[in-house]
Image (tube, helix red, strand yellow):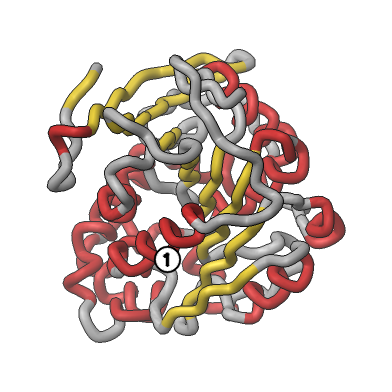
Amino acid sequence: MACPSTPPDAERLTVTDQIVTVRGRRLRVQVRRPQAASGPPLLVINGIGAALDLLDPFVDALPADREVVRFDPPGVGGSPDVLLPYHLTTFAPVVGDLLVELGYGRVDVLGYSWGGALAQQLAVVRPAQVRRLVLVATTTGALAVPAGPRVLCRFLNPRWMRNPAAALAAASEFYGGTVRTHPERAAATLAGIAHSLHRSRRGYAQQLAAIVGWTSLPVLRLIRARTLVVAGDDDPIIPALNATILSRGIPDARVHRHPGGHLAIVTEAPELAAVTAEFLGGRDPRDTAYSSPPGGIDS
């Protein structure tokens, strides 16, 4: 199914939304295709418990000539439930195969929160597929600096999200950033997360199970993709020190710090989209010339 996108350049974009089967898993996949793409496609991996639509404001703020690929993990959003649990170590190769199934070779990858962990794993196990890596509000997993006990309890038991009034009241404590002073800015986002959690309880539980015991800390040196770490100074879920750990572990990684919180990728989408676009578009001696033959395959 194809439909126009929402940015001002909508007439130049086509969005396809479909179910793709990879290794027996049926995943909802959305691709934003410009008439004339510039650079490799960008794979955007969302945070825990929310459908890919959560990051619409960020994707809409990206340059219109950037092809964007997104998917819902099993049991989340438009991806059907699965009976058996999975782990990041087994799911990252599925994502790599999904890219091949869609006809992509080398891509850029942006991972947000939970998606940042999956993006790291993908960059480790499929290095030839990842050109550049953007890690937003994320950590190294089990060996990271954790959130405070109160925030962690809310994260592990999100029943409060099912009550819109309670969710809005707790948003400033949980997400930080501009949500503290302007919680109304996040009202629509919180409603979307609450709706997704209500529909995807099994999917949320499986995403939690997927990161149990996982850590990238011992293998950060294996990430060869040029990396940008984006971190908020007021992120209660992901303390700022985690960005330092990532940047010191990944060779030649850069850090972009901003004053926002965990939802800045949505509430301050234009600012972070501009930072991301500048990083992805910058030249680097390690980059090989990118060309996209018909069909979008990087040769």
Question: In the displayed structure, does residue 255 sit left or right of residue 18?
Answer: right
Please, is residue 257 above or below residue 127 in the view? below
- Which residue appears at 46% of the width and 44% of the height? 44
- Measured from the top left, where is residue 282 in percent x and y? 51, 58
Q: Is residue 56 above or below residue 242?
A: above
- Which residue occupies the foreground of this view, 112 or 212? 112
Quarter of the image with the C terminus is top right
Q: Can residue 241 be seen in the rendering of this structure?
A: yes
State which quadrant residue 220 falls in: bottom right
- Residue matched to label 1: 275
In the displayed structure, 241 sits above or below 187; it is below
Residue at (72, 32) in percent of width and height: 90
- In the picture, measured across the screen, residue 214 lies left or right of residue 297, that is right
Tell me the element at label 1. Answer: helix
Q: Sort mark 1 into few (<14), some (14-19) or many (20+) by Cα contacts within 10 Å.
A: some
Q: Amino acid at mark 1?
A: Val
| In-front residue for pair 22/86 | 22
Residue 186 x/y as whole percent: 24, 66
Q: Quadrant of residue 275?
A: bottom left
The picture quadrant where one finds residue 107 is top right
Residue toward you, 268 or 86: 268
Percent of width and height locating residue 10: 15, 38
Quadrant of the rendering where the N terminus is positioned:
top left
Q: Residue at x 35, y 19 (%)?
A: 18
Point 30% across, 80% down: residue:
178
